[in-house]
Amino acid sequence: MQTIMNRPIVFSGAQPTGHLTLGNYLGALRQWTAMQADHDCIFCVVDLHALTVRQDPVQFRERILDLAALFLASGIDPEQSVIFVQSHVPAHAELAWLLSTFTMMGELDRMTQFKDKSRSHAHNVNAGLFTYPVLMAADILLYGTHKVPVGEDQKQHLELTRDVAVRFNGLHGTVFVVPEPLVTGGGAARIKDLQEPTKKMSKTAESDLAKVMILDEPDAIMKKFKKAVTDSLGVIRDDEEQQPGVVNLLNIWRAARGATMEEALAHFSHHQYGRLKVETGEAVVALLDPVRRRFQELRSDPKELEGILARGADQAMERAERMMQKVLTALGVPLQGSRFPIREQGRP
Ligand code: TYM
Protein backbone atom coordinates (compact mmCIF):
# COMPACT_ATOMS: atom_id res chain seq x y z
CA MET A 1 0.00 0.00 0.00
CA GLN A 2 1.38 3.40 -0.97
CA THR A 3 1.59 6.10 1.67
CA ILE A 4 -0.54 9.19 1.06
CA MET A 5 2.58 11.19 0.18
CA ASN A 6 3.49 8.86 -2.68
CA ARG A 7 0.08 8.65 -4.27
CA PRO A 8 -0.61 10.56 -7.47
CA ILE A 9 -2.70 13.65 -6.80
CA VAL A 10 -6.13 13.72 -8.44
CA PHE A 11 -8.31 16.82 -8.75
CA SER A 12 -11.75 17.10 -10.28
CA GLY A 13 -14.85 19.21 -9.94
CA ALA A 14 -18.45 19.70 -11.02
CA GLN A 15 -20.63 22.78 -11.22
CA PRO A 16 -23.66 23.19 -8.94
CA THR A 17 -25.89 24.18 -11.84
CA GLY A 18 -29.02 22.10 -11.43
CA HIS A 19 -28.92 18.50 -10.40
CA LEU A 20 -26.36 16.22 -11.99
CA THR A 21 -27.19 13.88 -14.82
CA LEU A 22 -26.45 10.26 -15.53
CA GLY A 23 -23.70 11.66 -17.83
CA ASN A 24 -22.01 13.35 -14.88
CA TYR A 25 -22.34 10.17 -12.85
CA LEU A 26 -20.94 7.76 -15.43
CA GLY A 27 -18.44 10.20 -16.96
CA ALA A 28 -17.09 11.61 -13.70
CA LEU A 29 -18.43 10.73 -10.25
CA ARG A 30 -18.24 6.97 -10.57
CA GLN A 31 -14.68 7.23 -11.80
CA TRP A 32 -13.74 9.58 -8.96
CA THR A 33 -14.94 7.22 -6.28
CA ALA A 34 -13.03 4.34 -7.85
CA MET A 35 -9.78 6.33 -7.70
CA GLN A 36 -9.87 7.05 -3.98
CA ALA A 37 -8.18 3.88 -2.81
CA ASP A 38 -4.88 4.48 -4.54
CA HIS A 39 -4.81 8.22 -5.23
CA ASP A 40 -4.62 11.37 -3.14
CA CYS A 41 -7.98 12.82 -4.28
CA ILE A 42 -9.39 16.33 -4.08
CA PHE A 43 -12.99 16.89 -5.24
CA CYS A 44 -14.50 20.33 -5.56
CA VAL A 45 -17.95 21.90 -5.95
CA VAL A 46 -16.97 24.63 -8.42
CA ASP A 47 -19.44 27.33 -7.47
CA LEU A 48 -17.39 30.21 -8.91
CA HIS A 49 -17.56 28.59 -12.33
CA ALA A 50 -21.34 28.27 -12.04
CA LEU A 51 -21.63 32.03 -11.51
CA THR A 52 -20.74 32.62 -15.18
CA VAL A 53 -24.45 31.90 -15.68
CA ARG A 54 -27.01 33.86 -13.61
CA GLN A 55 -28.07 31.99 -10.47
CA ASP A 56 -30.88 32.65 -8.04
CA PRO A 57 -29.00 33.20 -4.70
CA VAL A 58 -31.41 31.22 -2.51
CA GLN A 59 -31.53 28.28 -4.89
CA PHE A 60 -27.78 28.47 -5.53
CA ARG A 61 -26.93 27.96 -1.87
CA GLU A 62 -29.08 24.82 -1.79
CA ARG A 63 -27.59 23.53 -5.04
CA ILE A 64 -24.07 23.81 -3.64
CA LEU A 65 -25.07 21.69 -0.64
CA ASP A 66 -27.00 19.29 -2.87
CA LEU A 67 -23.96 18.71 -5.02
CA ALA A 68 -21.70 18.14 -2.03
CA ALA A 69 -24.24 15.61 -0.71
CA LEU A 70 -24.32 13.94 -4.10
CA PHE A 71 -20.53 13.57 -4.08
CA LEU A 72 -20.81 11.82 -0.72
CA ALA A 73 -23.83 9.73 -1.76
CA SER A 74 -21.89 8.52 -4.80
CA GLY A 75 -19.21 7.15 -2.51
CA ILE A 76 -16.68 9.92 -1.98
CA ASP A 77 -15.33 9.37 1.49
CA PRO A 78 -14.25 12.52 3.38
CA GLU A 79 -11.90 10.39 5.51
CA GLN A 80 -10.02 9.41 2.38
CA SER A 81 -10.42 12.40 0.06
CA VAL A 82 -10.67 16.16 0.35
CA ILE A 83 -14.14 17.47 -0.56
CA PHE A 84 -14.78 21.20 -0.52
CA VAL A 85 -16.44 24.22 -2.12
CA GLN A 86 -14.25 26.27 -4.49
CA SER A 87 -15.22 29.70 -3.12
CA HIS A 88 -14.13 28.66 0.39
CA VAL A 89 -10.52 28.70 -0.81
CA PRO A 90 -9.74 32.22 -2.11
CA ALA A 91 -6.51 31.11 -3.79
CA HIS A 92 -8.55 29.66 -6.71
CA ALA A 93 -9.69 33.12 -7.83
CA GLU A 94 -6.30 34.63 -7.07
CA LEU A 95 -4.34 32.09 -9.08
CA ALA A 96 -6.86 32.40 -11.92
CA TRP A 97 -5.96 36.10 -12.17
CA LEU A 98 -2.25 35.36 -12.23
CA LEU A 99 -2.68 32.60 -14.83
CA SER A 100 -4.84 34.86 -17.01
CA THR A 101 -1.65 36.81 -17.67
CA PHE A 102 -0.14 33.60 -19.06
CA THR A 103 -3.14 32.72 -21.25
CA MET A 104 -3.56 34.11 -24.74
CA MET A 105 -6.82 35.56 -26.05
CA GLY A 106 -6.51 33.36 -29.14
CA GLU A 107 -6.30 30.24 -26.96
CA LEU A 108 -9.50 31.13 -25.11
CA ASP A 109 -11.22 32.06 -28.34
CA ARG A 110 -10.71 28.53 -29.65
CA MET A 111 -12.59 26.86 -26.77
CA THR A 112 -15.63 25.08 -28.15
CA GLN A 113 -17.44 25.24 -24.80
CA PHE A 114 -17.17 29.05 -24.88
CA LYS A 115 -18.61 29.09 -28.38
CA ASP A 116 -21.48 26.78 -27.35
CA LYS A 117 -22.23 28.71 -24.17
CA SER A 118 -22.15 32.09 -25.87
CA ARG A 119 -24.80 30.76 -28.21
CA SER A 120 -26.98 29.32 -25.46
CA HIS A 121 -26.57 32.41 -23.21
CA ALA A 122 -26.46 35.05 -25.95
CA HIS A 123 -27.95 37.68 -23.60
CA ASN A 124 -25.10 37.27 -21.08
CA VAL A 125 -21.77 36.59 -22.79
CA ASN A 126 -19.74 37.88 -19.84
CA ALA A 127 -15.95 37.98 -19.51
CA GLY A 128 -16.12 35.18 -16.93
CA LEU A 129 -17.55 32.84 -19.54
CA PHE A 130 -14.53 33.64 -21.70
CA THR A 131 -11.93 33.20 -18.94
CA TYR A 132 -13.70 30.17 -17.45
CA PRO A 133 -10.90 27.76 -18.54
CA VAL A 134 -8.31 29.88 -16.71
CA LEU A 135 -10.16 29.38 -13.43
CA MET A 136 -10.28 25.69 -14.22
CA ALA A 137 -6.50 25.71 -14.83
CA ALA A 138 -6.08 27.41 -11.45
CA ASP A 139 -8.20 24.73 -9.72
CA ILE A 140 -6.01 22.01 -11.11
CA LEU A 141 -2.56 23.60 -10.89
CA LEU A 142 -3.08 24.83 -7.33
CA TYR A 143 -2.77 21.31 -5.94
CA GLY A 144 0.15 19.91 -7.93
CA THR A 145 -2.40 17.65 -9.64
CA HIS A 146 -1.13 14.67 -11.66
CA LYS A 147 -4.43 13.33 -13.02
CA VAL A 148 -7.78 14.93 -13.81
CA PRO A 149 -10.67 12.49 -14.35
CA VAL A 150 -13.23 14.15 -16.66
CA GLY A 151 -15.72 13.46 -19.42
CA GLU A 152 -14.71 14.11 -22.99
CA ASP A 153 -16.21 17.62 -23.09
CA GLN A 154 -13.50 18.88 -20.71
CA LYS A 155 -10.52 17.60 -22.68
CA GLN A 156 -9.90 20.87 -24.50
CA HIS A 157 -9.82 22.76 -21.18
CA LEU A 158 -7.28 20.27 -19.89
CA GLU A 159 -5.06 20.81 -22.90
CA LEU A 160 -5.14 24.54 -22.24
CA THR A 161 -4.26 23.92 -18.59
CA ARG A 162 -1.23 21.93 -19.68
CA ASP A 163 -0.14 24.67 -22.11
CA VAL A 164 -0.43 27.35 -19.44
CA ALA A 165 1.55 25.26 -16.93
CA VAL A 166 4.31 24.60 -19.46
CA ARG A 167 4.44 28.30 -20.40
CA PHE A 168 4.67 29.42 -16.77
CA ASN A 169 7.30 26.81 -15.92
CA GLY A 170 9.31 27.78 -19.02
CA LEU A 171 9.48 31.38 -17.84
CA HIS A 172 9.77 30.95 -14.05
CA GLY A 173 11.18 27.49 -13.36
CA THR A 174 9.27 24.33 -12.53
CA VAL A 175 6.48 25.45 -10.24
CA PHE A 176 3.50 23.53 -11.63
CA VAL A 177 2.98 19.85 -12.28
CA VAL A 178 1.73 19.38 -15.86
CA PRO A 179 -1.47 17.32 -15.36
CA GLU A 180 -2.79 14.43 -17.45
CA PRO A 181 -6.46 14.19 -18.41
CA LEU A 182 -8.07 10.87 -17.61
CA VAL A 183 -11.11 10.39 -19.79
CA THR A 184 -13.47 7.63 -18.69
CA GLY A 185 -13.52 4.54 -20.86
CA GLY A 186 -16.24 1.96 -21.41
CA GLY A 187 -18.58 4.22 -23.38
CA ALA A 188 -19.10 6.59 -20.45
CA ALA A 189 -17.00 9.55 -21.62
CA ARG A 190 -19.81 11.13 -23.60
CA ILE A 191 -23.30 10.09 -22.61
CA LYS A 192 -25.75 11.61 -25.09
CA ASP A 193 -29.07 13.41 -24.81
CA LEU A 194 -31.96 10.88 -24.98
CA GLN A 195 -34.00 13.07 -27.32
CA GLU A 196 -31.19 14.48 -29.50
CA PRO A 197 -28.53 11.77 -29.33
CA THR A 198 -25.95 13.71 -31.31
CA LYS A 199 -25.61 16.17 -28.38
CA LYS A 200 -24.09 15.40 -24.97
CA MET A 201 -26.52 14.83 -22.12
CA SER A 202 -26.45 18.16 -20.31
CA LYS A 203 -27.99 19.17 -16.99
CA THR A 204 -29.13 22.41 -18.60
CA ALA A 205 -31.07 20.74 -21.46
CA GLU A 206 -34.58 22.16 -21.63
CA SER A 207 -36.53 18.96 -22.15
CA ASP A 208 -36.89 16.72 -19.08
CA LEU A 209 -37.07 13.66 -21.31
CA ALA A 210 -33.61 14.48 -22.69
CA LYS A 211 -31.70 13.90 -19.47
CA VAL A 212 -31.73 11.33 -16.70
CA MET A 213 -30.95 12.97 -13.38
CA ILE A 214 -29.02 11.06 -10.71
CA LEU A 215 -31.86 11.79 -8.28
CA ASP A 216 -34.74 10.77 -10.57
CA GLU A 217 -37.20 8.26 -9.12
CA PRO A 218 -37.21 4.81 -10.79
CA ASP A 219 -40.54 5.47 -12.59
CA ALA A 220 -39.23 8.67 -14.12
CA ILE A 221 -36.05 6.92 -15.28
CA MET A 222 -38.00 4.11 -16.93
CA LYS A 223 -40.32 6.60 -18.65
CA LYS A 224 -37.37 8.56 -20.08
CA PHE A 225 -35.70 5.44 -21.47
CA LYS A 226 -38.94 4.17 -22.97
CA LYS A 227 -39.31 7.51 -24.78
CA ALA A 228 -35.67 7.69 -25.89
CA VAL A 229 -35.25 8.61 -29.56
CA THR A 230 -33.83 5.82 -31.76
CA ASP A 231 -34.35 5.48 -35.53
CA SER A 232 -36.40 3.56 -38.06
CA LEU A 233 -33.72 1.05 -39.14
CA GLY A 234 -34.90 -1.59 -36.68
CA VAL A 235 -31.50 -3.25 -36.05
CA ILE A 236 -29.20 -2.96 -33.06
CA ARG A 237 -25.68 -2.20 -34.28
CA ASP A 238 -22.69 -0.14 -33.18
CA ASP A 239 -23.01 2.51 -35.88
CA GLU A 240 -22.67 5.96 -34.34
CA GLU A 241 -23.19 7.80 -37.67
CA GLN A 242 -26.43 6.10 -38.66
CA GLN A 243 -27.78 5.15 -35.23
CA PRO A 244 -26.62 7.60 -32.54
CA GLY A 245 -29.65 6.89 -30.32
CA VAL A 246 -29.14 3.12 -30.34
CA VAL A 247 -25.38 3.45 -29.72
CA ASN A 248 -26.06 5.81 -26.81
CA LEU A 249 -28.37 3.23 -25.20
CA LEU A 250 -25.80 0.49 -25.75
CA ASN A 251 -23.14 2.71 -24.19
CA ILE A 252 -25.30 3.49 -21.18
CA TRP A 253 -26.24 -0.16 -20.67
CA ARG A 254 -22.64 -1.32 -20.85
CA ALA A 255 -21.36 1.51 -18.63
CA ALA A 256 -24.02 0.65 -16.04
CA ARG A 257 -23.31 -3.08 -16.28
CA GLY A 258 -19.53 -2.90 -16.72
CA ALA A 259 -19.76 -4.71 -20.08
CA THR A 260 -17.91 -4.29 -23.38
CA MET A 261 -19.55 -3.24 -26.65
CA GLU A 262 -19.15 -6.83 -27.93
CA GLU A 263 -21.03 -8.14 -24.90
CA ALA A 264 -23.73 -5.51 -25.35
CA LEU A 265 -24.19 -6.44 -29.02
CA ALA A 266 -24.23 -10.16 -28.25
CA HIS A 267 -26.90 -9.49 -25.63
CA PHE A 268 -29.14 -7.25 -27.75
CA SER A 269 -28.52 -7.80 -31.44
CA HIS A 270 -31.41 -10.25 -31.86
CA HIS A 271 -33.86 -8.08 -30.00
CA GLN A 272 -35.98 -5.04 -30.76
CA TYR A 273 -35.51 -1.48 -29.60
CA GLY A 274 -38.17 -1.86 -26.89
CA ARG A 275 -36.09 -4.45 -25.08
CA LEU A 276 -32.94 -2.33 -25.33
CA LYS A 277 -34.76 0.67 -23.86
CA VAL A 278 -36.33 -1.26 -20.96
CA GLU A 279 -33.16 -3.14 -20.01
CA THR A 280 -31.08 0.03 -20.18
CA GLY A 281 -33.59 1.78 -17.93
CA GLU A 282 -33.50 -1.11 -15.46
CA ALA A 283 -29.70 -1.14 -15.38
CA VAL A 284 -29.68 2.59 -14.65
CA VAL A 285 -32.30 2.29 -11.89
CA ALA A 286 -30.19 -0.43 -10.22
CA LEU A 287 -27.18 1.89 -10.35
CA LEU A 288 -28.81 5.12 -9.18
CA ASP A 289 -31.37 3.95 -6.65
CA PRO A 290 -28.88 3.49 -3.77
CA VAL A 291 -27.28 6.87 -4.57
CA ARG A 292 -30.65 8.66 -4.35
CA ARG A 293 -31.51 7.01 -1.03
CA ARG A 294 -28.16 7.92 0.52
CA PHE A 295 -28.49 11.48 -0.80
CA GLN A 296 -31.82 11.88 0.98
CA GLU A 297 -30.28 10.77 4.28
CA LEU A 298 -27.33 13.13 3.92
CA ARG A 299 -29.49 16.09 2.94
CA SER A 300 -31.62 15.66 6.04
CA ASP A 301 -28.61 16.61 8.20
CA PRO A 302 -27.21 19.94 6.92
CA LYS A 303 -24.99 20.46 9.99
CA GLU A 304 -23.08 17.25 9.33
CA LEU A 305 -22.67 18.21 5.67
CA GLU A 306 -21.49 21.73 6.48
CA GLY A 307 -18.99 20.27 8.97
CA ILE A 308 -17.53 17.98 6.29
CA LEU A 309 -17.21 20.92 3.88
CA ALA A 310 -15.57 23.13 6.51
CA ARG A 311 -12.95 20.47 7.24
CA GLY A 312 -12.41 19.94 3.51
CA ALA A 313 -11.91 23.69 2.98
CA ASP A 314 -9.26 23.81 5.74
CA GLN A 315 -7.37 20.91 4.19
CA ALA A 316 -7.58 22.39 0.68
CA MET A 317 -6.61 25.86 1.91
CA GLU A 318 -3.46 24.62 3.57
CA ARG A 319 -2.32 22.92 0.39
CA ALA A 320 -3.36 25.83 -1.83
CA GLU A 321 -1.45 28.34 0.29
CA ARG A 322 1.74 26.34 -0.13
CA MET A 323 1.40 26.52 -3.88
CA MET A 324 0.56 30.25 -3.79
CA GLN A 325 3.74 30.83 -1.83
CA LYS A 326 5.74 29.13 -4.59
CA VAL A 327 3.91 30.96 -7.38
CA LEU A 328 4.23 34.42 -5.82
CA THR A 329 7.90 33.81 -5.04
CA ALA A 330 8.54 32.70 -8.63
CA LEU A 331 6.86 35.88 -9.91
CA GLY A 332 8.84 38.12 -7.55
CA VAL A 333 5.90 39.18 -5.38
CA PRO A 334 7.08 39.75 -1.78
CA LEU A 335 5.35 37.39 0.65
CA GLN A 336 3.23 38.96 3.32
CA GLY A 337 4.05 37.73 6.85
CA SER A 338 0.67 36.93 8.39
CA ARG A 339 -0.57 35.16 5.27
CA PHE A 340 2.48 32.96 4.93
CA PRO A 341 3.74 32.04 8.38
CA ILE A 342 6.95 30.02 8.29
CA ARG A 343 5.92 26.40 8.03
CA GLU A 344 7.51 23.20 6.97
CA GLN A 345 8.04 23.00 3.23
CA GLY A 346 6.13 20.06 1.83
CA ARG A 347 4.40 19.15 -1.34
CA PRO A 348 1.49 21.43 -2.20
P1 TYM B 1 -19.55 19.84 -15.33
O1 TYM B 1 -20.08 20.35 -14.04
O2 TYM B 1 -20.23 20.27 -16.58
O3 TYM B 1 -19.53 18.25 -15.34
C1 TYM B 1 -18.89 17.50 -14.32
C2 TYM B 1 -18.20 16.29 -14.93
O4 TYM B 1 -19.13 15.48 -15.65
C3 TYM B 1 -18.64 15.22 -16.96
N1 TYM B 1 -19.78 15.13 -17.88
C4 TYM B 1 -20.05 14.09 -18.68
N2 TYM B 1 -19.41 12.92 -18.88
C5 TYM B 1 -19.96 12.05 -19.77
N3 TYM B 1 -21.08 12.29 -20.48
C6 TYM B 1 -21.76 13.46 -20.31
N4 TYM B 1 -22.89 13.69 -21.00
C7 TYM B 1 -21.24 14.43 -19.38
N5 TYM B 1 -21.65 15.66 -18.98
C8 TYM B 1 -20.74 16.07 -18.06
C9 TYM B 1 -17.76 16.42 -17.29
O5 TYM B 1 -16.83 16.12 -18.31
C10 TYM B 1 -17.09 16.67 -15.95
O6 TYM B 1 -15.99 15.81 -15.79
N6 TYM B 1 -15.59 22.72 -16.17
C11 TYM B 1 -16.04 21.54 -15.45
C12 TYM B 1 -15.90 21.64 -13.94
C13 TYM B 1 -14.53 21.96 -13.47
C14 TYM B 1 -13.45 21.04 -13.41
C15 TYM B 1 -12.37 21.78 -12.85
C16 TYM B 1 -13.30 19.71 -13.78
C17 TYM B 1 -14.11 23.14 -12.96
N7 TYM B 1 -12.79 23.04 -12.57
C18 TYM B 1 -11.14 21.19 -12.64
C19 TYM B 1 -12.06 19.11 -13.58
C20 TYM B 1 -11.00 19.85 -13.02
C21 TYM B 1 -17.52 21.35 -15.75
O7 TYM B 1 -18.20 22.26 -16.15
O8 TYM B 1 -17.97 20.14 -15.44
Image: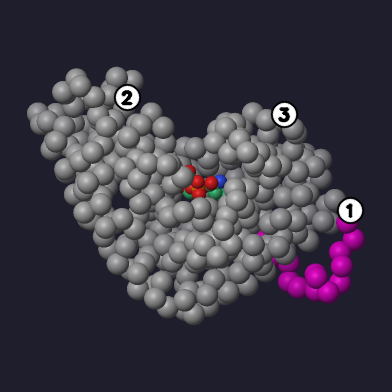
Rounded to the nearest whole Å, what is the CA distance between mark 2 and mark 1?
52 Å
The three-letter amino acid code for the residue at tag 1 is Gly
Type of secondary structure dominating the magenta stretch: loop
Residue at image position (25%, 50%) is: 221
Residue at image position (61%, 35%) is: 122
The image shows residue 292 at horizontal and vertical percentages of 32, 63
Q: Which mark is on residue 190? A: none
Rounded to the nearest whole Å, what is the CA distance between mark 1 and mark 3?
27 Å
Please give left or right for residue 63 compared with residue 178 in the image: left
Of 208 and 141, which appears nearest the observer?
A: 208
Q: Which residue is mark 1?
A: 332
Q: SS of the residue at dot 1? A: loop
Of 54 and 80, which appears nearest the observer?
A: 54
Q: SS of the residue at dot 3? A: helix
> What colouring style does the render use?
one colour
The image shows residue 205 at horizontal and vertical percentages of 43, 41
Task: Classify 94 as above or below 178.
Answer: below
Q: Which residue is mark 3?
A: 106
Residue at image position (35%, 73%) is: 297
- Asked whether the viewer can see residue 297, the reply is yes
Please give left or right for residue 153 compared with residue 263 in the image: right
**Residue range highlighted in magenta:** 332-348
Task: Classify 269 as above or below 210.
Answer: above
Quadrant containing the C terminus is bottom right
- Circle count: 3
The three-letter amino acid code for the residue at tag 3 is Gly
| Foreground tag (2 vs 1) | 2
